Image (cartoon, rainbow, N blue to C red):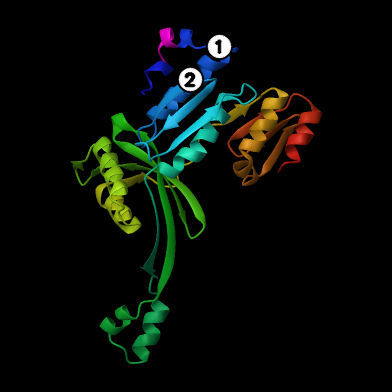
Amino acid sequence: MNNRWLRDKEELNKIVFYDKYYLKDLLYKIDIYLKSLPIPVVTKFENSSITFVVGDKNGFHKTYKINVDIAPYDFIKIINDDLEKEFPQYRIVREEEKKITKKFVTEKILEGFTSDEIIEMSPTYKVEEFGRIFRVLLKEDKFYMEKEVNGIKTKSIWSTCTTGVLMPVSEFLRTLRCMKLENAHDMEIYDFINENSRCIKDDFQYNYDIVIDYSNIRMYNFFKINLEELRENVIDKLDELEYNIGRFTIKFKDTNIKDDCLKLL
């Protein structure tokens, strides 16, 4: 199994599928998507379905039926929701010191404590952190990281070049995969990422809108598939049939599909 068939015209011509235009567009987008992932994934086409495999026979192995009523973007979203569980990630609980205020120091000095004693009694708090690498830029030795720290979600861009020393991102990811196979503790993964890479752009935000102007059935499927993200954002009505929700500019075909979709939120 490999992914050459995704972009091989001769292989595509051999495939029997009733909507070749849709299929070619879907496979083109899947090919681009797979090249951006932090893990190697191989695919194969069979019986109007695509199978995605990660690792050996005991690894991730799932088949997805192609449905032309689901836009390629949303088909990939369904796949990604499953594949991202295989991405390099960690979930830890750590302690951080709170900043000592001047008021706190003054009070403790008046109580007779020395500066060393005051430092030792610095208040701490627990930090629950989840981190996951979800995209890579191989040629730039950079990757995208999503985090959730005490319930606050952020996305950031990281580089594997630290203090003038470059570890190619391919080697960086290969090490993380080996650590997973060796059942490394999440704190070890956290330490490896922070010791061998650095954040170069914190709280990254997408600076473009995605225009969604699908046919009615595809539009309804779009809402069902992306429901969690849509619910996290404010609904901004631009026109009778046009709305902005987060990074999506949504253009409905008629009021019936608009009402049915908005009811899901």
The amino acid marked with disc number 1 is Lys
159 relative to 7 in the view: left or right? left
The residue lying furthest to the bottom in this view is 112
* Magenta span of residues: 7-11
Q: Is residue 107 above or below residue 86?
A: below
Identify the residue at horizontal 70%, vertical 31% (top origin). 220
The spot of residue 152 in percent (x, y) is 51, 55
Identify which residue is drawn at 23% across, 36% down. 168
Secondary structure found at label 1: helix
> Looking at the picture, which amino acid does disc 2 mark?
Leu
Displayed quadrant of residue 109: bottom left
Judge whether residue 141 is colored magenta.
no
Q: Which quadrant holds the C terminus?
A: top right
Asked which secondary structure carries label 2, the reply is helix
> Residue reaching furthest left?
165
184 is higher (above) or lower (below) than 212 = below
Rendered image: mark on residue 20: 1
Q: Please name the predominant secondary structure of the magenta segment in the image.
A: helix
